[in-house]
Image (spheres, rainbow, N blue to C red):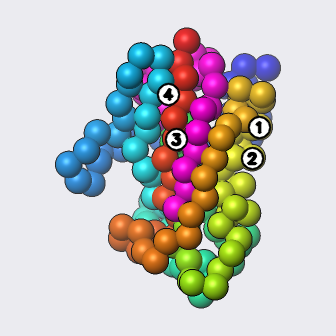
Amino acid sequence: MSVYDKLKALQIELPALAVPAAAYLPYVQSGSLVFLSGHIAKKDGKVWAGQLGRNVTTEEGQAAARAVAIDLLGTLQHAAGGDLNRVQRIVKVMSLVNSTGDYTEQHLVTNGCSELLGEIFGARGQHARSAFGVAQIPMGACVEIELIAELA
């Protein structure tokens, strides 16, 4: 099953390339690697604000990370010249989770992204990963994720 068949089966529509909110590019390609800038969680078109351990649950954080993954896929599709089938491997995911000092489930939040990438790309979606708890993310977002992928 192709990447697009999997997206259709999951009823996922990829967004258009987002315009950066500051002085950076949405992605940069170096050789066969493409580095996607951090994408913040959005819900209903607005920043998904909140802090894990205070007013956002782990399950809500997982949903936010999944939403970020969908946005990342939209950017990755653009970087791949419109064809996600060119993705040879999701190499690395780095997740920043806006969380209280005593919250320790950042890795579970990030699974929302990692699991979707696995569903879409199969073995090509298995990746190295880091998940950090941070005191704040731009615009108060609950999750921000960046991604590195290898293109054919």
Q: Residues within 10 Å of mark 1 (few under 14, many from 20)?
A: some
Q: Which residues are magenta?
A: 75-96
> Gap between marks 2 and 4, in whole Å?
18 Å
Judging by the rendered image, the residue that carries numbered circle 1 is: 119
SS class, disc 3? strand
Q: Residue at x 29, y 48 (%)?
A: 20
SS class, disc 2? helix
In contact (CB < 8 Å): disc 4 and disc 3: no
- Residue 92 lies left or right of residue 78; in this view the side is right
Instruction: Please tell me which residue lies in front, 140 or 8.
Output: 140
Q: What is the number of the mark on residue 147?
A: 3
> Gap between marks 1 and 4, in whole Å?
16 Å
Relative to 97, does residue 65 appear above or below in the rendering? above
Q: Residue at x 43, y 38 (%)?
A: 36
Sequence-first tag of 2 and 3: 2
Q: Residues within 10 Å of mark 3 (few under 14, many from 20)?
A: many
